Image (spheres, helix red, strand yellow):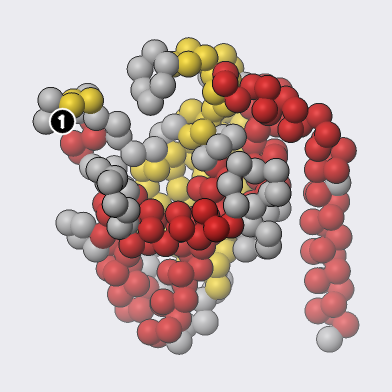
Amino acid sequence: MKHIKITAFDCPDTWFKTISAIWSAGDIFEVHYGSEDSRTKKLNLSIEITKPETRPLVDNKAPCDMKYVQWYALKYLWSGIVEGETYTYGSRLRKPVDQIEEAIKRYLEEPADRQITLIVRSPRDIMKHIDDRKHEPPCLTLIDTEAFEGKLNLTCYFRSWDAYAALPANIAGIQLFNEALVSEINRRGNLNLKTGKLIFHSKNCHIYERQFMLVENLLKPEKRSRRSLSTRASQIENFTTNAKQCF
């Protein structure tokens, strides 16, 4: 099992670097039980996004757009109300304990609190069947939080993660979720927090065989332009540093 760490500048950079790493170095993994029976390429991944707030949040070649990301952040993560769904991440974060509300309260009481972890998975998710039906545990397991040097950083764990189709919406949506969380803390307590890094871990970040051709076609024309993104990121950071020094 290969483990790789990826450091990326923003959300689009993360998506490209992730699928590129899996495509070039991923292990072949045959899925025989899960959401679909398929051959995949996968890695055990750790991802650090240093400037996830940078717009745009979604690459123009990703299989989602900002309209969907905004819906996902509001409905699937923040409120948890999606008609027809057995559960959402947000529904588990809101009930039986409203963890989002409690997190806001705890940061207002103690901004240096290190115990504020939002849990999506429950003990019942270890069961293969619930109420005589096949049970699919949530892919997103937890969102851990830490306020450090005036920024709220999130560390998230995905037990399984579709790198091509789900990851770009997930990371962009979680960034919007963090912005909403920070905004609500600031509104109530005037703490002047900002969003910080997003860090992700997944033991099985994968590309499905049905996506192989899509990924191969995506990487061919984008390699040269995307390779320059790290250079662009460095230029932006250098410009920001120089500008601060000038003022």
- Residue at coordinates 79% horizontally, 56% vertically from top-left? 233
Q: Is residue 39 left or right of residue 8?
A: left
- Residue at coordinates 48% horizontally, 12% vertically from top-left? 30
Kindly identify the amino acid type of the residue bearing the numbered disc 1. Answer: Ile
Residue 154 appears in the picture as rendered? no
Residue 17 appears in the picture as rendered? yes
Q: Position of residue 137 (x, y in %)?
A: 30, 34
- Residue at coordinates 81% horizontally, 29% vertically from top-left? 220
- Residue at coordinates 35% horizontally, 17% vertically from top-left? 33
Q: Position of residue 5 (x, y in %)?
A: 62, 37
Q: Is residue 225 above or below residue 155?
A: above
Q: Position of residue 7 (x, y in %)?
A: 67, 45
Q: Nearer the viewer, residue 94 or 247?
A: 94
**Residue most extreme to the left:** 131
User: Where does label 1 land, which residue?
Assistant: 130
Q: Is residue 142 left or right of residue 231?
A: left
Residue 188 occupies which quadrant of the picture? bottom left
The image quadrant where one finds the C terminus is: bottom right
How many marks the image carries: the answer is 1
Q: Judging from the image, what secondary structure is the residue with disc 1 in?
A: strand
